[in-house]
Image (cartoon, helix red, strand yellow):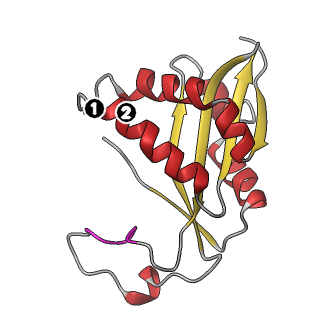
Amino acid sequence: MQPVTVSLGDRITARALFDPICQLYDEIFSVPPFHWNPDESEQHRRRFKVAIASLGFGITTAVTDDELVGFAYGYQLPVSTRWWEGFLEPVPAELTTEYEGRTFAVIDLAVRQGWAAAWASGGVCWGRCWRANLANAPARRVGSTLRV
């Protein structure tokens, strides 16, 4: 397995890698155990464009031999976010109240099949992605969602 190069990027990086990121997203999330809607690919492209335009956007990419094998991107949550809505039980205000620079939200993370071990053990770990993105958009905490 070739070495993996991890890079921190910004809006320019995301726009340059827009199609490969969308293709990798489709490759990973269109198969079980994930639920795939017929318009999921187009919805992701729209959401990704919105994310790129968001304040505090950051992206980390993993590349080997000019092939994108992983990415993680997100942005700082705005004060008026709806991120914390939809919980089954009430959530305390001290958790959900946002202020500028409080939370960096990881919106999407994907790793090409066969590269997960390299992502986790080859220095391209989750923590490194978070730290890299936080260097671009400092925040007091990181939040993410889980899609199953």
Residue 107 shows in this picture: no
The residue to which callout 1 is attached is 39
Q: Quadrant of the N terminus?
A: top right
Answer yes or no: do the residues labelled 1 and 2 have beta carbons within 8 Å? yes
Above or below: residue 31 compared with residue 142: above
- Provide the major secondary structure of the magenta segment: loop
Q: Residue at x 32, y 22 (%)?
A: 31
Describe residue 132's horizontal placement relative to residue 89 as left or right: right
Q: Quadrant of the C terminus?
A: top left
Rendering coords of residue 30 (x, y %)? 33, 24
- How far separated are the C-alphas under marks 1 and 2? 6 Å
Neighbours of disc 2 within 10 Å: few (<14), some (14-19), many (20+): few
Rendering coords of residue 130 (x, y %)? 66, 53
Q: Amino acid at mark 2?
A: Glu
Residue 76 shows in this picture: yes
The residue to which callout 2 is attached is 42
Describe residue 62's horizontal placement relative to residue 49 as left or right: right
Rendering coords of residue 36 (x, y %)? 26, 30
Provide the secondary structure element on which disc 2 rests. helix
Above or below: residue 56 compared with residue 110: below
Q: Which mark is residue 88?
A: none
Q: Amino acid at mark 1?
A: Asp
Q: Residue at x 46, y 85 (%)?
A: 97
Q: Residue at x 36, y 39 (%)?
A: 43
Tell whether position 78 is magenta.
no
Magenta region: which residues?
A: 82-86
Q: Residue at x 53, y 73 (%)?
A: 78
Rendering coords of residue 142 (x, y %)? 58, 64
Residue nearer the viewer, 5 or 1: 5
Above or below: residue 5 compared with residue 140: above
Neighbours of disc 1 within 10 Å: few (<14), some (14-19), many (20+): few
